[in-house]
Each structure stands twice: as structure tokens, then as C-alpha cells.
Amino acid sequence: MNGMLWLVWAILLALAVSVTRNPFYLALALLAVLSVRIAVNTTRPLGRAAPRFAVLAALVLIGWSTVVNVLLAHVGDRVITRLPPWPVIGGPLTFNALLYGALTGIALATVLIGISLLHAVLDRHEALRLVPGRQRVLATTLAIALNALPTFAAAARDAEEAIRFRGLAQHSLVHLRMLINAVLVRGMDYSLAVAETLEVRGFAAASRPSHRTRLGTLVFLAGGLIAIGGSIAGSGAILALGLSGLVFGLAGAAIHAWPGVRALPWPWSARVTALLLGLVAAGFVWALRDPAADLAYSPYPTLHWPGFSPVVGAAYLLLAAPAFALRGGQE
């Protein structure tokens, strides 16, 4: 797989998980992401393993979301117990709130684990080549961000090694303070060096974007806001309108990025994966038009079983397509 397919997969994953709280679809999406993570750790296409911190953060996120929602959302017909009339958290604790908090945590955790995989599979040079030529500022910003994180990580490792070698810190808080100071000092040096380089090369020179670029950016941002509003309101029509705006904005960017896309490697496994991701997108469009899919499932105010569409379920399960592509490429 190339960088373009990984970015498309990450976008599809984030959109698919963010528009539903149906436990069946979230379970399939989480299963697909975990299978991709296992395949990445097994094959290591770029020699890097998937970050472990993302899994730990995901577990904490699920627990935090569940507890907070139970304590703050006193709605539902399945009451577990009642707290005294305390401020904010007082009142009935319901199983409905517990379930919705857990589903929200699972959705966020799935996206977090999926996006974290880009660290292990995304070739940074390929990603920068996909940036349209007119987006000079965006390309430079991405390059700086991608180079800054390894610099900070190296600073933390060097400081850790120096502290242990010299025996400077015995207490954990003192140890942490010295690490933070080292990272901040290295970060300031890096920032000043980058700022001097950009100033010398005229990065701050004024440049007016074309009307077409402004229109595409405006449509993309408006589509994102409308899609979020439609997801919150549970309206498929509003959500479809917002997604249409996102697709229109992305299509404009894709036209300018097409030369970089053609330059990427496209073996048979990448082509099959692109076809499967297209089927995933088609399945999500079908879900927006199919009331039986029950994407807008909610356990409020009464708890009930969610609906399930086999077509939509297959689309969520096809998010595991990169795992098969990695296996096939290894063989």
C-alpha cells in the first residue's frame, strides 16, 4: 500500500466511526482496526511498529468516557442506583448512560488506534508529494511538523540517557522535570532555527490564493460543520449534504494532487485495496439512505436493540482491507 491509500483509509475510518453509535458497527470497525494493527506489527512495512501508547490511551479513554457519562447524564429507563442530590452528579445512574458513554469511548478509541497506525505505515515523503503544488504553505507546515516530533523524541531519549548515566535524579518528579526542561530547550532551539530558515527563504511573503482554491476550502469546511450537525441531530439528509460538501472539497484537492498520485507505486495489492475502499465508501452512502441501517442508534430514552444492515456491516468489516494487502505484499 502507498501513502495515498493509507490516508484514504484513515479518513474513511474517522468518518465511518464518527457518524454512528450502533454497537454492532462499532464492534466491526474496532475488529477491523485491530486486525490492521496486528498486520502492521507483523509485517512492519517501514520497519516501525505501531505505537503502544495509543492502545493504553484508548483503554483510558473508554473508561473515562463511560464514568463521566454515567455521572453527568441522568437519563434513561434502566436505573442502576441513585445518588444523593449532590451538585452536578446527583440523581439516578442509568444503564442507558453507561452504554452510551462506553459506545462513545469505543468510537474515539477506534479512531485513535487507527490514526496512530499512520506513524508506522505512512511514508512521509509520499505524503508530502501528495500536497498540491499551490498549497506551498501547507506542504511546508507538514514537513516541519513531521520533522519536529522525531526531534522532540530524540531530545527525551538523550535526556533520559544523560540522567541515568550521571545519576542526577532519584525522585520521579525531579526526573520528569528534567526531561521536560530538556525537551523544551531542544524545542526552542529547533523552533528558532526553523524560523530563521523560513525568514531567509521568504516563507512569509504574501501570496493570494485563487478564487477556486478559496471556494474549495470554504465548501470543505462548511461540509464538515454540516456533517457534524447532521450527525448530532440524527438527520440523514443533513449528514448527506455535509458529506457531499466534504467530497466536493476533497475532489478539488485531488485534482491538483493527481500528478503526485500517479507517481506513487500501484502494485496489484494496492489496486485491490483501492477497490475495496471504494466499496467501503459505497456502503456508507448506502447506509445514509437505508433506515434499517440504524446509524443514529441511541439508548435514550428507552433501551432497545439496535438495527443492523448486512450491507453496512460488510462495509465496516471491509475496513480491514489494509491487513490483507499487507499480508499479500509480504507473500
Image (cartoon, rainbow, N blue to C red):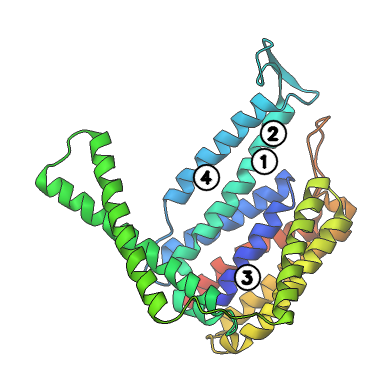
Residue nearest the viewer, comparing 155 with 204: 204
Label 2 residue SS: helix
Label 4 residue SS: helix
Does the residue at mark 1 contact the one at mark 2 (Cβ under 8 Å)?
yes
Q: Is residue 1 visible?
A: no
Q: Earlier in the sequence, mark 2 or mark 4?
A: 4
Camera-nearest label, 3 or 2: 3
Compared with residue 108, is residue 90 higher up or lower down, i.e. above or below? above
Does the residue at mark 2 contact the one at mark 4 (Cβ under 8 Å)?
no
Whole-Å distance between the Cαs marked 3 and 2? 30 Å
Whole-Å distance between the Cαs marked 4 and 3? 22 Å
The residue wearing badge 3 is: 8
The residue wearing badge 1 is: 103
The spot of residue 21 in percent (x, y) is: 73, 45
Whole-Å distance between the Cαs marked 1 and 4? 12 Å
Compared with residue 274, is residue 176 higher up or lower down, i.e. above or below? above
Q: Is residue 198 visible?
A: yes
Residue nearest the viewer, comparing 127 with 206: 206
Compared with residue 201, is residue 68 higher up or lower down, i.e. above or below? above
The amino acid pointed to by label 4 is Ala
Q: Earlier in the sequence, mark 1 or mark 4?
A: 4
